Amino acid sequence: MNDVNFMALAENIFGKSRDIDNFILLNLGTGIRPLFVVNDVVIEGSGGNCGEISQKEIFVSEIGNRMIK
């Protein structure tokens, strides 16, 4: 389990999704990781990374020689 799995578990026990069987938790941290819960079961995929977009640098614009992230 990782931090996003624990976030979903806490949300399912203590949060607003405690009465909901299916939900998506979207974590925006070092990467973009959605976590899917279907019928109160975390869908992890074959490699445990279902929906994960990984760590990618996205440059929004360039001003002179300076990159703004």
Image (cartoon, rainbow, N blue to C red):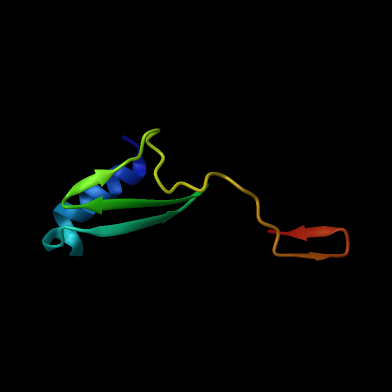
Pick out the residue farthest to the left. 19
Query: What residue do we see at 25% from left, 45% from top?
Result: 42
Q: Residue at x 34, y 50 (%)?
A: 35
Q: Is residue 29 above or below residue 15?
A: above
Q: Nearer the viewer, residue 46 or 54?
A: 46
Dividing the picture into quarters, in which one does residue 3 lie?
A: top left
**Which of 17/67 is in front?**
17
Position of the N terminus by quadrant: top left
Q: At 46% across and 46% down in the image, what residue appears?
A: 52
In the image, is 52 to the left or to the right of 16? right
Q: Is residue 66 above or below residue 35?
A: below
Q: Observer-nearest residue: 62 or 45?
A: 45
Relative to residue 1, is residue 53 depicted above or below? below
Q: Image quadrant for the C terminus? A: bottom right
Q: Quadrant of residue 17?
A: bottom left
- Would residue 64 appear left or right of 4 to someone viewing this image? right
x and y, in percent, of residue 36 in the image: 31, 52
| Residue 47: image location, x then y, percent | 40, 33
Q: Nearer the viewer, residue 55 or 3?
A: 55
Picture coordinates of residue 51 (x, y %)? 42, 49
Residue at image point 35% right, 37% down: 2
Q: How many numbered marks, from 0 up? A: 0
Q: Residue furthest right?
A: 64
